[in-house]
Amino acid sequence: MAAATQKDLQERMQTVALQLQKIEDELQSTVEVRQRLDSQLTENEQVKKEFSVLKLDDVVYKMVGPVLLKQEQSEAKTNVDKRIDFIQNEIKRTESQLKEINERSEKKRLEVVGIQQAAQQLQQGGETEV
């Protein structure tokens, strides 16, 4: 490999910094998705808890647009259970995404450190390879 110049290292650092910024943006949006899922899970678990205190003859309504429609309790409970399962699966998927994004971020951070070390060596008078 050819010896790296200061200009080569600066260009490489800019490229890696942009890649790292994209990864950080992706991480931020994934964290926001995870937070929304947590909120939805909490809401649905609260609804499920409220369903547990209903009597068999209590009426349940479902909001469809601006209208409240009567709904069977069993159907409403089933829908909430399905929603909870779906949200829990989405949380698992999001958690694995977060893990993968964090791993990529760490690799880019190490790459930045390597470039910085090469730049320091170059400034101290030695040629380096990137």
Image (cartoon, grey):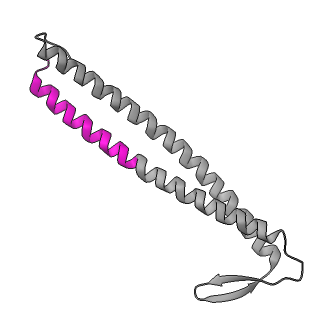
Which quadrant, please, contains the N terminus?
Answer: top left
Left or right: residue 101 compared with residue 34: left
Residue at x 85% of width, y 82% of height: 58
Chief secondary structure of the magenta span? helix
Image location (x, y in percent) of residue 78:
77, 68
* Residue farthest toward the top in the current orientation of the protein: 126
Left or right: residue 54 compared with residue 126: right
In magenta stretch: residue 18? yes
Q: Taking the image as drawn, is residue 127 in sight?
A: yes
In magenta stretch: residue 35? no
Q: Which residues are magenta?
A: 1-26
Image location (x, y in percent) of residue 98:
49, 43
Residue 104 picture quarter: top left
Residue at x 90% of width, y 78% of height: 56
Left or right: residue 19 compared with residue 50: left
88, above or below 14, in the image: below
